[in-house]
Amino acid sequence: MIETEAQVREWGRSVGIVIPKEAVIKERIKIGDNVKILLKKKENPLKETFGTIKLKRSTEEILKEIDSEAWDIE
């Protein structure tokens, strides 16, 4: 069993998932084979890819500081 990602696509009035060729080769899947699929929607792909950042100050504090500095420019 392997884990892979695929994008859901529309085919006529149905939807389908394309299995990556590497997965087909590794699992020796042939046309007509039955496969078991575990589905889990990615809630936030960017967060899952890049993670999160923890700041010492809140975003609101940082934005206020940037805004006040912008007005100080002469």
Image: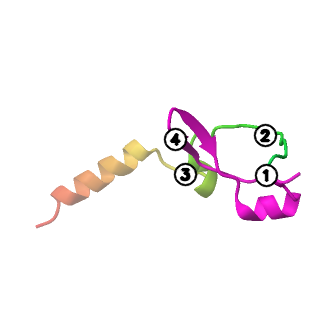
Q: What mark, if any, has residue 10 been given in the picture? A: 4
On the rendered image, what quadrant is the C terminus found in? bottom left
Q: CA distance from mark 4 to mark 2?
A: 18 Å
First in sequence: mark 4 vs mark 2: 4
Q: Nearer the viewer, residue 28 or 1?
A: 28
Tell me whether circle 2 and circle 3 mark residues in contact (CB < 8 Å): no
Q: What range of the chain is rendered magenta? A: 1-30
Q: Position of residue 9 (x, y in %)?
A: 54, 44
Residue drawn where x is 87% and y is 59% of the image: 28
Give percent across and percent down for residue 4: 74, 54
Q: Residues within 10 Å of mark 1 (few under 14, many from 20)?
A: few
Considering only order in the chain, which callout, 3 or 2, is on the residue closer to the N terminus? 2
Residue receiving disc 1: 31
Amino acid residing under circle 4: Glu
Image disc number at residue 46: 3
Q: Does residue 44 show up magenta in the picture?
A: no
Residue that appears at 51% across and 32% down: 13
